[in-house]
Image (cartoon, rainbow, N blue to C red):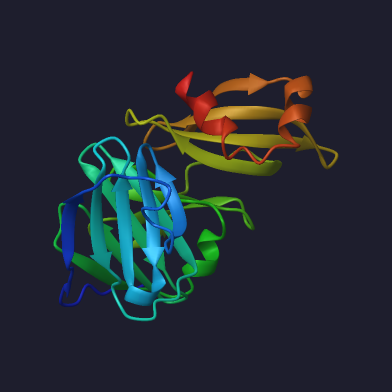
Amino acid sequence: MSFLNPSPILVSSTFLKLSLSCHSFPSFTFLSSSDALFYLSHFSSFTFHVFNLFSKASKTILYPIHALHFDHLTFTSTPSGYVIFVSTFNSGFLYQLNASAWSHFHFHDFGPVLDHQLGVLFNGGLYFATPKSFSVVVFDLESGGRESLNAGLPGQLTFFRLVSNGEGKLYLVGGIRSNGISRSIKVLEFDGNWWVEMQSLPDLICRTFEDLTLASEVPFFASQL
């Protein structure tokens, strides 16, 4: 795997104080949110926009390239701001609030690996769950390198999702099957080397979870750990 960080792509960005209302951004397309930050796109002007609902501030960021068509987008808040990661089939673009430019990385066949799940920020990297082979891929924010995390995932997984509690901990919530049916849900914590089981939920709760996407339930559950 090779990666390249060429000359920085300069970013035109501004902070604006504004009075938000239901008519503030009628032509914007909502992409994602994290904490009180809303991430939107204005396709006709080739710009991304980050709105802070608490401070009522807005930041405008030019696309890294014109006519950007991306396969995956991760937008996540950090203690010092936020991280934006977009990828195509063989390229990735990274923007961090404390930077003045997009970083551009080349890699092979990365977009499809990410699939529909967002990356989770942990220990200087974005951690992605890969649903097809049930593995974890790490994208290093500094180098742009990508590697598989060999940390001993539990066997017989039917689904899993990565979550963070915002306090420097990474969790995996996954369903464990027996005879092709999820019989339990396990919560594991990554200790830097291996996944360590923290808790196992019984069959009754597992059947309830099978009907949910876990998009809203898992972050709440992880915050209670």
Would residue 49 be found to the left or right of residue 10 on screen?
right
Q: Is residue 48 above or below residue 80?
A: below
Q: How many marks?
A: 0
Q: Is residue 191 above or below residue 96?
A: above
Q: Is residue 119 visible?
A: no
Residue at the location (47% across, 48% down)?
A: 150
Image quadrant assignment for residue 60:
bottom left
Query: Residue 165: percent from the left, percent from the top?
Result: 41, 29
Residue at the location (22% across, 72% down)?
A: 5
Would residue 217 be found to the left or right of residue 169 on screen?
right
Query: Residue 186: percent from the left, percent from the top?
Result: 62, 28
For this rendering, which residue is in front, 27 or 192?
A: 27
Image quadrant assignment for residue 42:
bottom left
Q: Is residue 37 above or below residue 9?
A: above
Would residue 67 be found to the left or right of residue 151 on screen?
left
For this rendering, which residue is in front, 30 or 162?
A: 30
Q: Is residue 58 visible?
A: yes
Image quadrant assignment for residue 65:
bottom left
